[in-house]
Amino acid sequence: MEKEVLTFVIFLIHILAESLNKSPTTVYRLLSNSKILDTYIIPSYDVLHTLGRQYLIEDITSLVKERGLIWE
């Protein structure tokens, strides 16, 4: 994984954790175990990294809900 992509993934995990009052570990586990990280976030880096913080939070949170997943 390129450094820019890794930096973005870390940023995204932390803003999601902060907005959801969850630990970054919890957020990472859900995104990784559900394959959202590998099938959506990383492949869509070119588009996602240009979007605003609030949009990213809403987009990923919506995707998690659509897949019927629960933040532990």
Image (cartoon, rainbow, N blue to C red):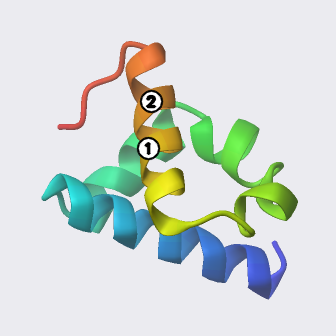
Left or right: where 41 falls relative to 2: left
Q: Quadrant of residue 39?
A: top right
Viewer-side residue, 55 vs 8: 55
Q: Which residue is drawn at the image coordinates 63% and 82% (left, top)?
A: 7
Q: Which residue is drawn at the image coordinates 30% and 66% (left, top)?
A: 24
Badges 1 and 2: C-beta atoms under 8 Å apart? yes
Q: Where is residue 57 in the image (x, y as percent from the top left)?
A: 43, 52
Alpha-carbon span between mark 1 and mark 2: 6 Å
| Number of residues whose C-alpha sits closer than 10 Å to that of mark 2, classed few (under 14), some (14–19) or many (20 or more) | few
Viewer-side residue, 38 vs 46: 46
Left or right: where 50 falls relative to 13: right
Q: For the residue labelled by badge 1, is the local secondary structure a helix, a strand or a loop?
A: helix
Q: Where is residue 31 in the image (x, y as percent from the top left)?
A: 48, 44
Q: Which residue is drawn at the image coordinates 46% and 15% (left, top)?
A: 66
Q: Where is residue 32 in the image (x, y as percent from the top left)?
A: 52, 45
Q: Quadrant of the N terminus?
A: bottom right
Left or right: where 56 falls relative to 57: right
What residue type is disc 2 on?
Ser
Label placed on residue 62: 2
Label placed on residue 23: none
| Number of residues whose C-alpha sits closer than 10 Å to that of mark 1, classed few (under 14), some (14–19) or many (20 or more) | few
What residue type is disc 1 on?
Glu
Q: For the residue labelled by badge 2, is the local secondary structure a helix, a strand or a loop?
A: helix
Q: Which residue is drawn at the image coordinates 53% and 54% (left, top)?
A: 56
Q: Quadrant of residue 4?
A: bottom right
Label placed on residue 58: 1
* Label total for image: 2
